[in-house]
Structures are given as C-alpha cells and as structure tokens.
Image (tube, rainbow, N blue to C red):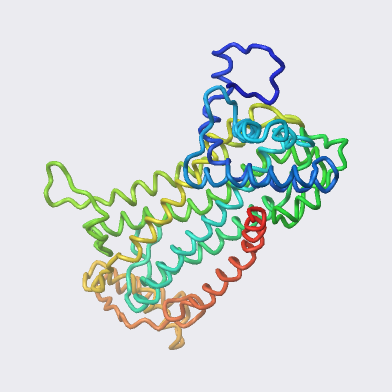
C-alpha cells in the first residue's frame, strides 16, 4: 500500500519519484526514533489543546511506543511505495488504530517534523561525539603524564628546533580537543531549540502550545519565529559540520604526526602491531594504515561545512527540496568521526614511546637555545650569547647540556595537565545532556 501524506489521487512519473526521493528513505531510518519521540510530544500537546481526546491520546501513545520498540530492535523499515519516515509511522498507526492514526499530523508539516527529527538526532549524536572525544582526551592525558619526563625533538619548518617532550606532545592534542569542545558546545546550544509548531514555516491557526512541546522534548528553549525555524534548516547542519570539522582537524594532525614519528627515519614511537599492516612483497613493513585512514577520513570531514554550504547557498527564506541533499553527507559524518575517535583512543593508549631518542647526536643542536639562555642568565647580553653559541656550532665546539630546566606554565617541567583536565570537565558539564535524556525517558513511559 503506497502512502504519501500529500497524495490527492494523482500519479507521479516513476522516474521522477525515484529521482526526488533519492536515498532519503535509507537515511530516514536513522531519524525514525526521533520522529516517534517528536510525535509523542506532539500528541500530548494536541490532547491538551482539545484536538485529541484522552482515550485517543492513550492508544496513540501506546502505538507509538510499540513502533519505537521495533526501531530499537532493528525491525523498522520504510516500505515500498512509502515516501519517508513520517509517512511510514503514520501508516503503521493507521493500520493498527484506524482513523485515529490520521490525527497525529494536525498542526504539523513534514517541514517541521524533519527539522525536529534532525535536531533530536543531532542532539543525540553530539552526546556520542562528546563522549568519544572524552575517551581520546583521557588516553592522551594518561600518556602525557606517563611520559612527561621523556624528551623528544621539537620542530619548526621540519627542522630540529628545540627540546620538547612526550608529555608536551600528547598533552598538546588533549588541550586541542578542549578547544574543539567549545565548537561542539556552540553547535549544541544552537541545536537545543525546539522548531516543532513552525509547521511549513508559517505556523498554524491551531492554538499550539509550543512551550509544552519544548519542555516535553527536553529542549532549553524554542525557535520562536516560525519563519526563522524553517530558515534554520541547513544552517544548523552547516554549523554542526564546522564543529565536527574542528575535531577532525585535530585528529588529522595527530594522525600525520603519528605516521611521521612511527617511520624508521624518526623512530620516536612504535604503534601496536595489531594496528599496522604488512606489504605483499616487503616482509619488514609495518604500515600505519589506520592513522593514514583516520587522516583521510578526517580531511574529508573537514570539507563537510563547504559541501553543506554549497547546497544551501543563496536559498531564500522558506522550504526548498535542495535541503534534502544535506542529509546525504550530514548523517553519515557522525558515525565516521566517532569511528576515527574510537580507533585513535585505542591506539594512543597502546603506543610505546622511544625513551632513548636523544642518544642520537643529530639532535644535539636542539639544545643550542638552552646554552644561549644559560649565558644570558650569567649576565651576557642575548645578542652576544646568540652569536657566541652560533660561532661555537660552526667551529664544532658546541657541547650540549641536556639537563632541561623549564618551569613556566605549560612547559616541559610544568605541563599544567590538571588545569587542562579541569577545562575539559567544565566544557562537558555545560552540555546538560541529562535534561534531554530524562525528557526522552519520560516520553516513553
């Protein structure tokens, strides 16, 4: 049985129908649980304003909970001839309950349904992403503390520059993730606004209680202006994509470092054997394929904001079918980034560092600045000290002192890891994930 919410006994060209639906049905399955949650909140509100009777609400609520259970069990599908997730859920209700099932669409449009579904989906995925970021952050901090006394070369222009440490290297990426969480939090706050009730973008003549659905769905507030609620489609995805892209940027850089430092010419770290692959003809090879793939996938995610931007660029206010295309790149990006974060956290925990890097004399010159600073502390002007050490290097007289004494905040001897952990904890607490989780739990009671 075909089901289109807009059907008025007209026939659509099959090729046109296939083209316009595209991959929407497959992607809509990811939105199904959120469509049910939104429908439960909506019918509770409809009963309050008198568009549903109490007994109708009760049977619709039970029917929607049953559909939700099939989704959680992996048994939900969008049938042949059914256009989208909204149509499928209404069809299932109508089959089971008769005409009562047709009442759930009062005061709604598929426009505000998909707006809501995408926000609820995004809210859930932000939580998963934040938790995955925290796991990688914890792994980096553990390695930073564990290896804070082991020195390694620092580089500028890929030239050996000054002393660094594994404590600094691991900790740098941990603090980078703290800043990335600020982007994620900004995206969450934009997502944490209820668009339901905006209908097709111009509201409804029904006396909808949008404050009630905002509370029931666990949003902090609502998109007040119904035209702007519709304009937010595409904008929310684009801004969320920027948040994903900044996390991906940190991961891509970490992956590049890991590939470089794992190579024989560096030998700074050793990746776990179960995270490397071999060569078909070179028996000695242990390739860092996992980090190479993380780098590639994360570089692809960094292009996501531009993809969404180009789909939505120069659209006037109101709804347009162009917006459907954003789902094709937006929905899969969360899973791809989470996979990268999970794998990176595992590898970081298992990485072994080389404690004997500085035994190699090629790194002696990275201590030249330490010698300049020592002379300055003894009273020599900086320019004179710089020149003396430079001439000693040219003459082959430079002898490095490898005893490092860095004490300022964030340096080799004072990593400030405790403060960095505190910043991450503050960022995580600002999300208020519990409010959303509790609301969803209440809807399903």
Q: Nearer the viewer, residue 397 or 282?
A: 282
Residue 435 sits in which quadrant?
Answer: bottom right
- As drawn, 381 above or below 395: below
**Which percent across, then down, holds residue 304?**
53, 40
- As drawn, 219 above or below 109: below
- As drawn, 167 above or below 17: below
Q: Is residue 381 left or right of residue 427?
A: left
Residue at 85 percent of width and 43 percent of height: 50
Q: Nearer the viewer, residue 73 or 131?
A: 73
Q: Nearer the viewer, residue 145 or 200?
A: 200
Q: Is residue 370 left or right of residue 206?
A: left
**Which percent across, then down, holds residue 360?**
21, 70
Image mark count? 0
Which quadrant is home to the C terminus?
bottom right
**Which percent across, then down, holds residue 224?**
81, 47
Which quadrant is home to the N terminus?
top right
Q: Nearer the viewer, residue 182 or 386?
A: 182
**Which percent across, then down, holds residue 265?**
23, 57
- As drawn, 213 above or below 201: below
Name, please, the residue furthest toward the bottom. Answer: 378
């Amino acid at each position: 049985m075909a089901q289109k919410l807009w059907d008025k006994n007209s026939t659509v060209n099959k090729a046109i129908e296939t083209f316009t639906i595209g991959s929407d049905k497959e992607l809509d399955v990811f939105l199904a649980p959120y469509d049910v949650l939104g429908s439960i909140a909506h019918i509770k509100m409809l009963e309050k304003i008198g568009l549903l009777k109490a007994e109708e609400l009760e049977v619709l609520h039970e029917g929607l909970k049953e559909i939700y259970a099939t989704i959680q069990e992996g048994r939900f599908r969008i049938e042949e001839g059914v256009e989208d997730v909204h149509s499928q859920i209404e069809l299932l209700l109508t089959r089971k309950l008769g005409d009562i099932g047709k009442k759930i669409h009062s005061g709604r449009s598929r426009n505000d349904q998909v707006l809501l579904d995408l926000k609820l989906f995004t809210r859930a995925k932000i939580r998963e992403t934040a938790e995955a970021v925290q796991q990688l952050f914890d792994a980096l901090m553990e390695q930073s503390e564990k290896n804070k006394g082991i020195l390694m070369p620092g580089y500028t222009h890929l030239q050996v520059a000054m002393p660094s440490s594994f404590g600094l290297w691991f900790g740098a990426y941990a603090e980078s993730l703290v800043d990335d969480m600020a982007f994620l939090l900004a995206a969450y706050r934009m997502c944490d606004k209820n668009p339901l009730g905006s209908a097709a973008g111009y509201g409804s003549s029904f006396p909808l209680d949008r404050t009630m659905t905002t509370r029931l769905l666990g949003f902090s507030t609502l998109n007040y202006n119904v035209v702007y609620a519709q304009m937010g489609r595409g904008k929310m995805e684009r801004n969320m994509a920027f948040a994903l892209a900044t996390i991906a940027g940190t991961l891509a850089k970490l992956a590049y470092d890991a590939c470089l430092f794992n190579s024989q010419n560096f030998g700074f770290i050793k990746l776990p054997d179960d995270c490397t692959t071999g060569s078909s003809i070179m028996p000695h090879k242990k390739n860092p394929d996992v980090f190479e793939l993380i780098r590639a996938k994360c570089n692809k995610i960094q292009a996501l904001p531009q993809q969404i931007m180009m789909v939505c660029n120069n659209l006037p206010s109101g709804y347009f079918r162009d917006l459907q295309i954003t789902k094709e790149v937006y929905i899969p990006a969360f899973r791809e980034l989470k996979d990268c974060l999970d794998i990176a956290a595992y590898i970081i925990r298992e990485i072994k560092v080389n404690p004997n890097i500085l035994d190699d004399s090629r790194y002696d010159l990275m201590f030249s600045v330490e010698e300049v600073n020592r002379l300055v502390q003894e009273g020599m002007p900086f320019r004179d000290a710089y020149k003396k050490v430079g001439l000693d290097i040219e003459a082959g007289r430079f002898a490095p002192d490898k005893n490092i004494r860095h004490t300022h905040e964030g340096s080799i001897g004072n990593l400030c890891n405790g403060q960095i952990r505190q910043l991450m904890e503050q960022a995580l607490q600002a999300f208020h994930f519990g409010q959303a989780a509790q609301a969803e739990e209440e809807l399903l009671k």
